[in-house]
Image (cartoon, helix red, strand yellow):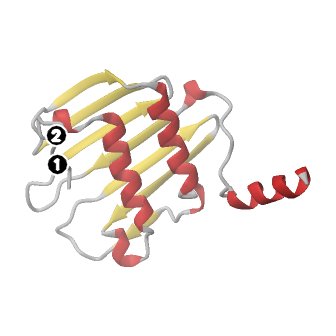
Amino acid sequence: MIAAATVAIALLLPSGFPRISDWNSLNITLDRSPCFGRCPDYKVEIHGDGTVIYDGRNFVAVQGRRESHIPIYKVRSLFEQFRLVRYFSLKDSYQSSATDLPTYVTSIAFDDKTKSVKDHLGTAVGMPHAVVELEDAIDRAAETQQWIRGAANSTVR
């Protein structure tokens, strides 16, 4: 009975996602590039200890570097989202031929593992919508709205 339950649970867990040994090595990033308009242009990093580093470049309320801290449960929840979307099995790039749209690059690094995914209108070329949700989850966890829009209730996109 226990063996059957273990097999059932194992089947539900996404495969191919490495385990993390050192939470202090965790580094999650989201880089949103400019477009031929007023798209927010910034990068945010979330570290395993909850440190958030934001670098606002253009079309954001706050330009320059800012640092804050989020609770560890948010970091772990975000890590779980990477696991659930099978991040390490995604393509490295989902790129449309459009030239006037922003590019979003997410990445995760921990222990000796590193992976990034480039999204340039990626859902139009087969990128799972879960990657868009992951991009937005990084923003929510990092609480970037305080720097992008100057208000916690507005959306990035």
Residue type (three-letter) at the residue carrying disc 1: Pro
Q: Residue furthest front?
A: 1
Identify the mark at residue 40; answer none if there is no mark: 1
Position of 33 with respect to 130 (left or right) is: left
Task: Please report the residue visible at 75 percent of the width from the left and 55 percent of the height from the top.
Answer: 9
Task: Check disc 1: other Cα within 10 Å, few if <14, some if 14-19, many if 20+.
Answer: many
Residue 115 percent location from the top left of the image: 53, 50
Task: Please report the residue visible at 59 percent of the width from the left and 28 percent of the height from the top.
Answer: 23
Residue 120 percent location from the top left of the image: 32, 65
Residue 98 percent location from the top left of the image: 23, 75
| Element on which disc 2 rests | helix
Mark 1 or mark 2, earlier in chain: 1
Q: In terms of depth relative to the viewer, which is nearer, 110 or 149?
A: 149
Where the C terminus falls, by quadrant? bottom left
Quarter of the image holding residue 60?
top left
Task: Please report the residue visible at 9 percent of the width from the left and 36 percent of the height from the top.
Answer: 61
Judging by the rendered image, the residue that carries numbered circle 2 is 148
Identify the mark at residue 6; answer none if there is no mark: none
Distance from the alpha carbon under mark 1 to that under mark 2? 7 Å
Position of 133 with respect to 63 (left or right) is: right
Q: Are marks 1 and 2 in contact (CB under 8 Å)?
A: yes
Count the marks. 2
Give the vertical position of 83 relative to 146 (above or below). Answer: below
Task: Please report the residue visible at 15 percent of the width from the left and 45 percent of the height from the top.
Answer: 154
Quarter of the image holding residue 146?
top left
Residue 88 percent location from the top left of the image: 59, 55
Where the N terminus falls, by quadrant? bottom right
Q: In terms of depth relative to the viewer, which is nearer, 75 or 22?
A: 75
